[in-house]
Image: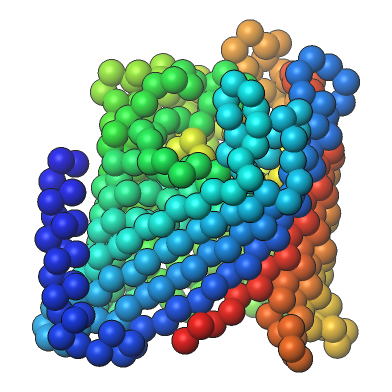
Amino acid sequence: MRYIAPFMAGMLLCAWVSLVQADLLRDSSASLQLRNFYFDRDFDEGPGQSQAQEWAQGFILRMNSGYTEGSVGFGLDALGMFGVKLDSSPDRVGSGLLPFDPISHEPANEYGKLGLTAKARMSASELKVGTLQPLLPVILAVPSRLFPPTFRGGHLISRELDGLDLHLGHIDRINLRNSTNYEPMRISSPNGRFGAGAESNAFSFAGGEYAFTERLKGSYFYGQLDGLYQQHYLSLLHQLPLGEGSLKSDLRFFDSREDGAGRAGKVDNRTYNAMFTYQWQGHAFGLGHMHLSGDTALPYLAGTDVNVNTEGALTSEFVNPGERTWQVRYDYDFAAIGIPGLKAMWRYIKGDHIDLPGGSGDSRERERGIELAYVVQAGAFKGLGLRVRQAAYRNDFSRDFDETRVNLDYTLALW
């Protein structure tokens, strides 16, 4: 990874020299996203903090250049994020919206970060070096709070063959969603699953996605957090016309082991996912199952999300050692009855056979979640989105809690 910094500097120099000679605004774009986020997690009685409740306003500026002319085109992107505290206190921190002092727990009034990404394009291949936001099965940087996590590294994407996307990348640092500093990477370790203090300065990934037909897609990815774990991922996604609707089958598989010295402890996991969803008019009826085998939980990067069929669950990822999960989900799109932009969701997830360190070997957890979302379709506020989510979490190995999230999103195109 010591070669990343000088290589990035060289790419930045080439990009800036070329851009100065070209029209800076040609094929470029810029947008400002306004995100207002309220988070409330209310714990049942017990030791520790009784509530994590915060409210914040975020501003996300994205500026993307075009490419210079020639067989190899160069460009430069910029990403700026600025967050403002609207409500919080030392006894209510920990929502992931705002940074806070580790000793006094005093939340920051404001915080910001800036990232630059040099890019080069040749034919249908693109290389990006600098600030990255990968959305891949083995490194999933989704915006589940005010801001998404970002990474420092390089990412090559090739689309030279029709229907095939290839990825190759290397990361050396993560900037957590409520932080302004880049830091080494760790394994996500809730419930004492792994050694949370073990760090790594190198995460490498490779893989590809292929569309076999219009209705069948598959993917394979490999990820390695140096000295901690390595992981293989396989998936198949199929859409089958059935009656007046269609049946979507979503199959995913992870195989994970410790890497090298295994500084976070033993890693031994196979995770099998299956989700079947029947879509008819505005309705979607889903049934899912997930089975974890091996001696440990499913590992993934701390500060990111894990790509399993419980994605979007507010309270837990349901990937504890030995866990077996059933999920029932119902979605409705009100466009089917003449109200475009309005969507609703209800789901119930239950996991059992959880074998946590020091536990009984048959612990259980469950979440009941609901969601209502609306995007304004026309007028002065076209594109303004409101999303309200609520979940109740119950288990027999930690504290129960109820959680509510409300966010308003609006993106303004600057040019």
Quadrant hosting residue 83: bottom right
Q: Nearer the viewer, residue 180 or 324?
A: 180
User: In the shown orientation, is residue 380 left or right of residue 99?
Assistant: right
The residue at 45%/78% (across/down) is: 30
Q: Position of residue 272 (x, y in %)?
A: 54, 41
Residue located farthest toward the front when viewing the structure as drawn: 109
Quadrant of the image containing the N terminus: top left
Q: Position of residue 211 (x, y in %)?
A: 40, 71
The residue at 39%/21% (across/down) is: 198
The residue at 58%/29% (across/down) is: 101
Q: Is residue 170 above or below residue 114?
A: above
The residue at 48%/22% (across/down) is: 196
Q: Position of residue 63 (x, y in %)?
A: 41, 73
**Residue 350 in sight:** no
* Count of numbered circles in the view: 0
**Residue 182 in sight:** yes
User: In the shown orientation, is residue 196 left or right of residue 155?
Assistant: right
Q: Is residue 206 above or below residue 223?
A: below
Residue located farthest toward the top when viewing the structure as drawn: 358
